Image: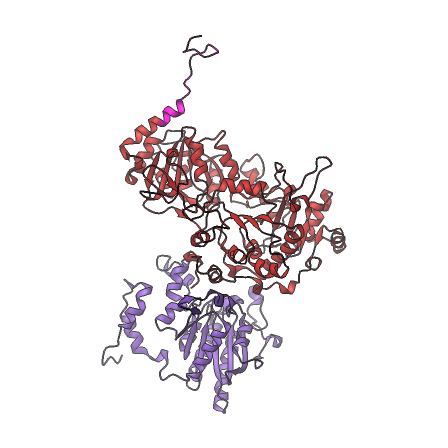
């Protein structure tokens, strides 16, 4: 499931590359609107509702009136949808009490709509370093609420996560990404539980060199994550391509078994990797392809 | 008068002492040499044989490429054997460049730039470990190699050599021919580390009879991509400044020949030529001939037909295939690859281009600028060479004549020297200050004069996000200061400026705000950039540009 760089006669079509409209260039609000069918977008709890974090100003951070999460309702490929977009430009997309509550509440409202007969799908645009450090435990609690709401909603409707870049998706919100029915990435997107800087500061530069972009993308990058099954669709950084991929993913409906339920499969893959002698990132897909759960493994 | 007596009747003088010394040095190194080729495993012994205490040694640390294998070997020398060397290094880039002093192998230093090692440089100077002769500009240091600083030994680097010593530098020629010439033609020893020893070099950048010894380095020499700027990091304010620079300077003065310093602000200008510049109908009217490295951000302008020629100081990693495929634009050899040359490009930048534009860390009320900040001794590099009005110029051009100065009959034009900067740097540090840190640094380090990068009286224009100051139009020092203050925003220099004064300066044409230039501030968006990512640059190049790993966010 890959929408690659446009090709013509086997050659990359560079003109088509340049003619594309970059999704990455858009801010969270514009991304959400660009995904929805024309003229259907309607923002909930927008900046003029002035619901901002009370915790930032005392710590010397200027708050924003949407707290960095944009919730937009509308129609996606003809179906009712809610898009939850994290703004990477505000505090690195960190999730605080208010922004987390906005995300969790919108997902819960989508659950209610579904139960009351309006089949609403959810799309999450995840550009976030995880929990906002200034709001520590409150942020952690809301990320847990987001995950709980995702679990509730995904039984009813597909949930599509998009990690376009350039921030990527890390920390607690990477768990939320892991719960999505379909995860779409560009090759500039990154996905990981711990961000490169966190690993380096905790375990040392020998463990992970956070200045080595080639290494970071070889492990966390969209091509690697889709190639190894931790994400599903690799898409070009192009508004039309991202929107089509999202609509396609919604069309596939609720998967028979969610990725996060395939525990035996993931355990077998973990067992196939020796942390003391890890495979080259480029070889991981092959290593994992041969990691089949043992018969009768009921762990 | 006998043959053995000179005209004064004094004892005969030996006129070939340097030549004799060179012969003796090479003789001493013979056990480690086969033909011209040194055994890389015996580098330390070879240097012990070649070098004498007090020697003047040019170690090739260019702006970009570094003779790192030889630098490490020099730092490894026994200070009992080799000591009190006088090093000439244009760019102090490697830790080994300063290890040599800490280990007592070298004592005196003449240099031009110390970017990555600037903090340690300042410490070693304060501790008295290094004796600094002077901090130069690039061409100034090379010039002195032909006057009073001729090297006894030159330690250089190149891409390839053949067994006759012919050198191939590839795109990164930079300073190798210049240093080699200074040493080779006054009986200095020329020793070159090469990435590869080959039977036949693709082209001869330096002829073999200038070269005494070659050593094949175990690793390719270090080369940093210093001139690559990722368009992702260009913000709206950079774009606004770029628009004002295009309208208020490039278009107004019809600048066709120019040099760009490196930075996001100038990268933004390069990237809006095919969009904003095209809308203004300026293609063919400005920016036709360039002296600058192969900036990847110039690719879209080249591809859109803006650029007729580019001469380069050095190469830039990743641009090799692209440059080789555009020989009408770039200077390339018969082998196809770029030929750069810093001294000639500097010369071109001084006498043949109408404009220099670049930015500094600090600018004072008189437009003096400096990149020296407390605790750092960065030096100058080449910016002062490009960023001044050369009084040796006589040919006229419309841009040069547009800044006509002097009293008849001694009329002359003037080079445009443009400073472009946001009023505040990241972290809220003001770019416009009452006193340059350089003044204090000069006092602390007992320098004869403060290390000013570009002198204020050479600066003709200052561009900030507030507007453009036309300093060349000021008739008094007070006017100059007011014009500068008018674009200095809320910094200590700008914050006391009164609105009615700004109005008067606008009326007199000393200052232009965006609306005076017809620049729509709302249009300053990233969509105006012809390329918004490194990937876009690759696409513009048709896949010919190979960005270094650190610039690939995929």
Q: Nearer the viewer, residue B166 or B372?
A: B166
Most common SS among magenta residues: loop
Q: Does A173 lie within the magenta span?
A: no
Q: Is residue B8 magenta?
A: yes
Residue B474 lies in quadrant: top right
Residue A97 lies left or right of residue B520; in this view the side is left
Number of numbered markers: 0
In the picture, the quarter occupied by the N terminus of chain B is top left
Chain letter matching colour red? B
Q: Position of residue A121 (x, y in %)?
A: 48, 83
> Along the line of sight, which residue is nearer the eye, A239 or B70?
A239
Image x and y of residue A211, in percent:
42, 57
Asked if A10 appears above or below B282 in the picture, the reply is below
Residue B300: x and y in percent read: 52, 58
Residue name at image x 62 percent, y 75 percent: A48
Q: Residue furthest bottom?
A: A117
Colour chosen for chain A: purple
Decide which of A172, B243 is in the foreground and name it: B243
Q: Relative to B468, is B164 above or below?
A: above
Query: Which residues lie in the magenta part?
Result: B1-22
Q: Quadrant of the C terminus of chain B?
A: bottom left
**Residue at far top of view:** B1
Residue nearest the observer in this picture, B74 or B511:
B511
Q: Identify which residue is drawn at 50% across, 52% down.
A: B295
């Amino acid at each position: 499931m890959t929408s690659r760089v446009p090709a013509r006669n086997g050659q990359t079509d560079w003109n088509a590359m340049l003619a594309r409209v970059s999704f990455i260039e858009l801010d969270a609000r514009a991304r959400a609107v660009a995904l929805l069918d024309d003229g259907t977008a309607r923002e909930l709890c927008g900046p003029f509702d002035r619901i901002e974090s009370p915790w930032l100003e005392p710590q010397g951070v200027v708050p924003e009136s949407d707290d960095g999460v944009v919730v937009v309702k509308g129609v996606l490929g003809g179906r009712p949808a809610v898009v939850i977009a994290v703004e990477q430009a505000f505090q690195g997309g960190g999730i605080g009490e208010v922004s987390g509550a906005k995300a969790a509440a919108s997902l819960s409202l989508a659950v209610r709509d579904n139960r009351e007969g309006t089949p609403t799908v959810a799309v999450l645009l995840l550009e976030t370093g995880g929990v906002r450090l200034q709001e520590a435990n409150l942020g952690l609690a809301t990320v847990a609420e987001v995950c709980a709401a995702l679990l509730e909603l995904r039984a009813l409707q597909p949930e599509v996560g998009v990690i376009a870049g350039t921030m990527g998706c890390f920390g607690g919100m990477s768990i939320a990404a892991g719960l999505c029915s379909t995860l779409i990435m560009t090759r500039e997107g990154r996905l990981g539980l711990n961000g490169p800087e966190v690993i380096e500061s905790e375990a040392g530069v020998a463990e992970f060199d956070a200045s080595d972009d080639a290494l970071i993308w070889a492990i966390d990058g969209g091509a690697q994550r889709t190639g190894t099954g931790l994400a599903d669709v690799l898409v070009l950084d192009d508004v039309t391509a991202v929107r089509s991929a999202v609509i396609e993913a919604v069309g596939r409906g609720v998967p028979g078994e969610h990725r996060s339920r395939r525990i035996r499969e993931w355990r077998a893959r973990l067992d196939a990797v020796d942390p003391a002698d890890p495979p080259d990132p480029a070889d991981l897909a092959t290593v994992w392809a041969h990691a089949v759960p043992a018969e009768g493994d009921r762990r | 008068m006998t043959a053995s007596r000179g005209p004064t009747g004094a004892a005969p003088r030996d006129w070939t002492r340097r030549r004799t010394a060179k012969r003796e040095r090479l003789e001493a190194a013979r056990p480690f040499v086969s033909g011209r080729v040194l055994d890389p495993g015996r580098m330390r012994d070879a240097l012990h044989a070649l070098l004498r205490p007090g020697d003047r040694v040019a170690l090739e640390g260019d702006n970009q490429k570094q003779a790192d294998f030889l630098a490490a070997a020099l730092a490894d020398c026994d200070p009992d054997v080799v000591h009190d060397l006088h090093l000439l290094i244009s760019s102090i880039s490697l830790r080994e460049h300063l290890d040599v002093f800490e280990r007592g192998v070298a004592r005196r230093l003449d240099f031009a730039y110390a970017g990555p090692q600037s903090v340690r440089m300042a410490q070693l100077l304060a501790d008295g470990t290094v004796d600094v002769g002077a901090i130069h500009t690039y061409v100034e240091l090379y010039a002195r190699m032909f006057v009073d600083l001729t090297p006894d030994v030159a330690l250089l680097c190149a891409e390839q050599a053949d067994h006759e010593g012919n050198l191939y530098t590839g795109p990164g020629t930079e300073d190798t021919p210049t240093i080699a010439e200074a040493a080779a033609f006054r009986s200095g020893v020329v020793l070159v580390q090469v990435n590869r020893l080959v039977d036949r070099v693709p082209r001869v950048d330096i002829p073999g009879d200038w070269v005494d010894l070659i050593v094949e380095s175990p690793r390719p020499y270090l080369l940093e991509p210093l001139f690559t700027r990722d368009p992702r990091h260009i913000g709206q304010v950079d774009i606004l400044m770029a628009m004002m620079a295009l309208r208020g300077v490039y278009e107004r003065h019809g600048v066709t020949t120019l040099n760009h310093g490196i930075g996001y602000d100038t990268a933004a200008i390069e990237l809006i030529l095919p969009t904003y510049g095209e809308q203004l109908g300026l293609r063919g009217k400005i920016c036709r001939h360039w002296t600058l490295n192969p900036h990847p951000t110039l690719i879209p302008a080249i591809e859109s037909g803006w650029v007729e020629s580019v001469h380069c100081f050095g190469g830039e990693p990743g641009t090799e295939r692209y440059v080789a495929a555009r020989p009408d634009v770039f200077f390339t050899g018969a082998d196809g690859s770029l030929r750069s040359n810093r001294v000639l490009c500097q010369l071109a930048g001084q006498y043949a281009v109408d404009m220099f534009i670049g930015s500094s860390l600090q600018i004072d009320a008189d437009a003096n600028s400096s990149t020296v900040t407390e605790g750092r001794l960065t030096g100058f590099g080449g910016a002062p060479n490009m960023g001044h009005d050369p009084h040796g110029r006589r040919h006229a051009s419309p841009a040069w004549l547009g800044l006509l100065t002097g009293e008849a009959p001694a009329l002359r034009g003037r080079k445009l020297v443009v400073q472009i900067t946001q009023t505040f740097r990241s972290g809220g540090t003001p770019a416009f200050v009452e006193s340059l840190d350089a003044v204090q640094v000069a006092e602390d380090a007992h320098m004869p004069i403060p290390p000013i990068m570009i002198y204020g009286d050479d600066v003709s224009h200052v561009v900030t996000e507030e507007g453009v100051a036309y300093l060349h139009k000021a008739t008094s020092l007070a006017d100059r200061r007011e014009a500068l203050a008018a674009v200095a925003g809320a910094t200590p220099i700008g914050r006391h400026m009164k609105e009615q004064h700004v109005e008067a300066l606008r009326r007199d044409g000393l200052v232009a705000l965006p609306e005076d230039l017809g620049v729509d501030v709302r249009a300053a968006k990233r969509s105006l950039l012809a390329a918004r990512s490194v990937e876009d640059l690759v696409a513009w190049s048709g896949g010919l540009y190979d960005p270094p790993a650190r610039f690939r966010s995929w």
